[in-house]
Amino acid sequence: MSTLSRSSMNATPDHLTHSLLEDVLAILIGTLLVAFGVTMFKQAGLLTGSTAGIAFLLHYRTGLPFGAIFFVINLPFYWLAWRRMGWRFTLKTFIAVSLLSVFTSMHGQFLHLGGLNPFYTGLVGGLMMGMGFIALFRHQASLGGFNILALYLQDRYGIRAGKLQLGLDLLILATSLLLVSWPALLGSILGAVAMNMVIGFNHRPDRYIAM
């Protein structure tokens, strides 16, 4: 497995360089897909991983808005993003996190789903979120938090972002045993596996890199 170096991120072939319009559309579409999956999870009583999972736990415990919690939790990670991934990545990630915070609230106003099966929701919602992350990753953006950490470690040490993200997600889900039912927990785990399979198969340092 080849390692994605910092220099390789900055030396992108011309035919892989994205235009501003392409970046804007990718960030909009990616955050919309992830927000839709998060909304499905929320209405089915499921959880997810990464900083969104932590935001879910705090939302369920305190009743504070998910979007606001998610935005605040990601603030400390921008320093790592700026220092290691560059200002463009940091700016795009800040915009993506802000949009997700807004879109999760927006979806909740327009989308009301009843009788969601936790396993179906976990699978479909997880796949949708995975595709949303791929759209962001391929345009040098993320949704902050562990995504930044996973991409940095892939850049520095060649560790697959999907595998690392999956491990962190499962750790977060393990802390939710007292908050959700077993079917909801198993559905959440299925969602984490589906999402990170999409990321692991499609985001590799030896396949697609563009800025």
Image (tube, helix red, strand yellow):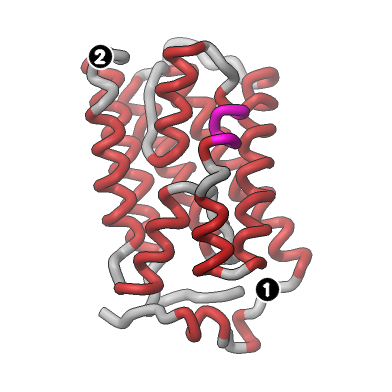
Q: Is residue 174 above or below residue 61?
A: below
Q: Secondary structure at mark 1?
A: loop
- The residue at the point 29 percent across, 67 percent down is 159
Which residue is labeled 2 in the image?
178
Decide if residue 71 is on the left or right side of residue 24.
left
Q: Examine the image and state in which quarter residue 67 appears.
A: top right
Q: Is residue 71 magenta?
A: yes
Residue at the disc numbered 1: 18
Quarter holding the C terminus is bottom right
Considering depth in this image, is 177 or 29 the residue closer to the camera? 177
Residue at 41% from the left image edge and 32% from the top image edge: 53
102 versus 110 height, above or below: below
- Mark 2 vs mark 1: which is more N-terminal? 1
Q: Residues within 10 Å of mark 1 (few under 14, many from 20)?
A: some
Residue type for callout 2 = Leu
Asked if residue 85 lies left or right of residue 121, the reply is: right
- Residue 141 position (above or below residue 185): below
Q: Residues within 10 Å of mark 2 (few under 14, many from 20)?
A: few
Camera-side residue of 98 and 47: 98
